[in-house]
Amino acid sequence: MDHIYWVGIRKSDLLSLEYLYQGSITFFGDEKDGNICLFKKGVARKNHNVELDIFAEFNKEAMERILSKDPEANFMFYNPILAYSLEDHLRKKVICLNSLDILKIIDDKMLCKLWLKGSAQQLECVQMFGREISLKAVNRILGNKQEYIIQLPVSSGGTGTYVFNSQNCDAIIKKLLPSQLYTVTPYYKDALSLNMHCVIYENTFQLYPVSVQIIKKENNNLIYRGCDFISCRSLNDNILDKIKKQAESICQRLCQSNYRGVCGIDFLLIDDQIYFCEINPRFQASTIALNLALADQQLSSVNEATINSFFGFEEPMASSYEIDVPYSAYAYEEDNDYKEFHKNIFQVYFSSSKERDILKDGYDFDVCAEQGAYLFRAIFPYSLTDISNGDMRINELLGGYGIETPIEPICLKLMLLTFGVKISSEAICYIEKNGSLRQGNFSAIDIILWDDFIVNCPYGINHAEYSPFTIKMDADRLALYYFQKKITDISIYYESPLNQKKTSGGVAYSSIAFLATDRLRINYNPVCYYKRSKNACKFCNLPETNQPYSFHDIFEIIDDYIQNESFRHILLGGGSSNPDSNFEEIIRLAEYLKRKTEKPLYLMSLPPKDLDIIPKLYEAGISEIAFNIEIFQETWALRYMPGKGKIPRSYYYEALEKAVSLWGHQGNVRSMVILGLEPEKFLLSGIERLCKIGVQPMLSIFRPMESTPLASKLPLPISKTLELYEKIQDICQKYGQIPGPSCPYCQNNTLSLPFS
Ligand code: SF4
């Protein structure tokens, strides 16, 4: 079919569909390839959800203009119900248009729910006039749920949708129109909103994969921000099956009612149950990501399927439900608090995705936009959300963190640990002139902000290219910037030249030793026992293979570092030994070191199987010791540490108590715990137990590592981690502890401060 013109909100909906349309009429666009748009480059942008009238007028004019040049033109609407506001001669030119009767039923949330009663499981819901709504009245009718969603029967993108509770009820009631009907449903804050595209044919239908809807709660409104098809891979088959069954039953009703073409069905996932929410009788904001995946696999787009469903050109696709959609998408909207954030995302995204310029939709960051106006969108080949724990975490680095320039040191440190840094090309030149960058632990670099304030910042991983922090040159010094604002001059650690050497036996020094901040780490095992036995912790990115080495190699390296480098203390660490080990090798190593140097020795290991080994470690000269419990609750420990998690948690406490009896409770006995992998109640009670027995907790924030099973798991939101930190500090204070370690240099990758 030729001469089709697209009419929709964004020109970017045509990404991967350019061949299908002769041109387009859009709210936002770039005037390229036959695009006529209201908000192009340089024109102040308005919120399309509240300016639909302007758009309707603009559409009519643009359609007339196109028809005057191309009388054969046909128009396909993103939201076909809008075509019913056109005059007859224009509406006749609209293709893929359902009857107004069916569109009205589906578009009205309450009518649609009534229509589908019996066909799909639904949450309880009532319809009330604005004048009838009060918290008391709603509680009485819906059984004291305390928090509700109030919605206009017809709305989209979150406009006209309010979260209603005791804190905001007065303000919301003022916004409601007394004689307007609203639908009221209980609000489940941890519910996941899921969407499925469907295309309805004459006697059949076609389902597509499910996506998570990224919905943010902002100023008592729930605002749609984007979609994520990738994170849905973590939904179990039982849930997917329930969604599919309900979608099939709804599609059958649509088929019987002569509905044709695309629609999107929204569901809520609450405690493993699927509830139908609404049908959107139009294309979806997420269609762009789905179409991109279909194009990658040379399959017909949703738009083509819709045309086929009306004109019968082609049979429906056989297994559309099974296709892989490896994308997520996010739409950025104007918000005065996020200006710098948007500018950063825009610059980084489009500098590396030039072929995706269409996603700018005519926006450039010097354009004015009113609050809430759409700016641009981005499609990512990785997940933006994490739904593995039943609720949804959004990748803050890409979705926004809403924090002003971090002034508080703990906030600054947390953001650096989480978001990492990027380095300007001038700063890289400067660094290369002065030596090699010393890559700290876990693909990160250690930066020194103030005398004793050192932070281990991810670099080159975890989308750190989007970090708000940049290391740049300021005159002839390295400096750290938060967006454009300078925070402070910094310095960095350069790599030790010894790191490039090999032992006389041909073993690379870097396989055994690593100099970080003021500490030399010696890996007493070439490879962790759990890595070797294929039972590794799911968050760990240490290598599974390494060069074999002997004590002779280790001693040679130790001697060289002691003679030629300066450092304050030595850590014996690296991967775990066999849990049945008798610690002979560690004791031998400690004794050797004690003969060679007076530097303090810090051991990080599993708790020994025989607790009588602990005094032997003390006698061998170990001055500080850590048995890292990491996750306190057994089930969560086994979930993320299938090998190491088998050691009973109670055994850690026993070993740590024994260690405290020797090394005391002043911070020489420690245990690392991970923030972000288990529920708060287990974390806090575990930390309290550590403090109570005299163990200093060290807080490691969960950071996803590439090539690990948890690579797509997201860290806790910054605000949540700060809240946890305060609670942990209170617990520590109660028992005379601080979040450790006490050595400021070793604090580089823990949530702790040298001056707490
Ligand atoms: S025990 Fe340590 S080194 Fe071994 S897999 Fe677990 S985290 Fe990695």
Image: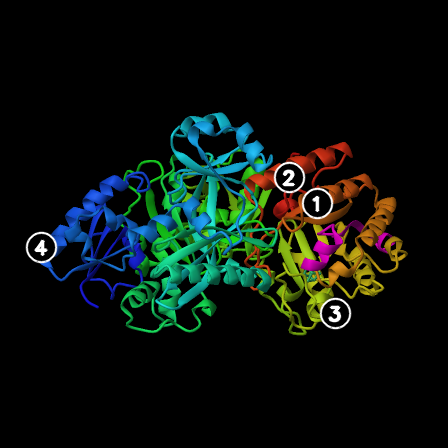
Front one among 610 and 194: 194
Question: Which one is in front in this view, the residue at disc 3 or the one at disc 4?
Answer: 4
Q: What is the spatial separation of the Cα atoms under label 4 and label 1, in whole angstroms?
A: 68 Å
Contact between marks 2 and 1 (CB within 8 A): the answer is yes
Which quarter of the rendered picture does the N terminus lie within? bottom left
| Labels 4 and 1: the sequence-earlier one | 4
Report the side of 661 relative to 70 (left or right).
Answer: right
Question: Which one is in front in this view, the residue at disc 4 or the one at disc 1?
Answer: 4
Ligand 1 is found in the corner quadrant, namely bottom right
Extreme-right residue of the structure: 612
- Residue identifier under label 1: 683
Tell me where the magenta segment starts and ends, as one range.
Answer: 617-640
Three-letter residue code for mark 4: Ser
- Residue visible at 66% across and 34% down in the picture: 756
- Residue visible at 62% across and 64% down in the picture: 510
Front one among 679 and 127: 127
Tally of numbered discs = 4
Q: What is the spatial separation of the Cα atoms under label 4 and label 2, in whole angstroms?
A: 64 Å
- Residue identifier under label 4: 68
Contact between marks 4 and 1 (CB within 8 A): the answer is no
Three-letter residue code for mark 2: Leu
Report the side of 90 relative to 680 (left or right).
Answer: left
Q: SS at mark 2?
A: helix
- Residue identifier under label 2: 724
- Residue identifier under label 3: 552
User: Does label 2 point to a residue whose CB lies under 8 Å from ligand 1?
Assistant: no
| Labels 3 and 2: the sequence-earlier one | 3
Q: Is residue 478 visible?
A: yes
Report the side of 254 relative to 664 (left or right).
Answer: left
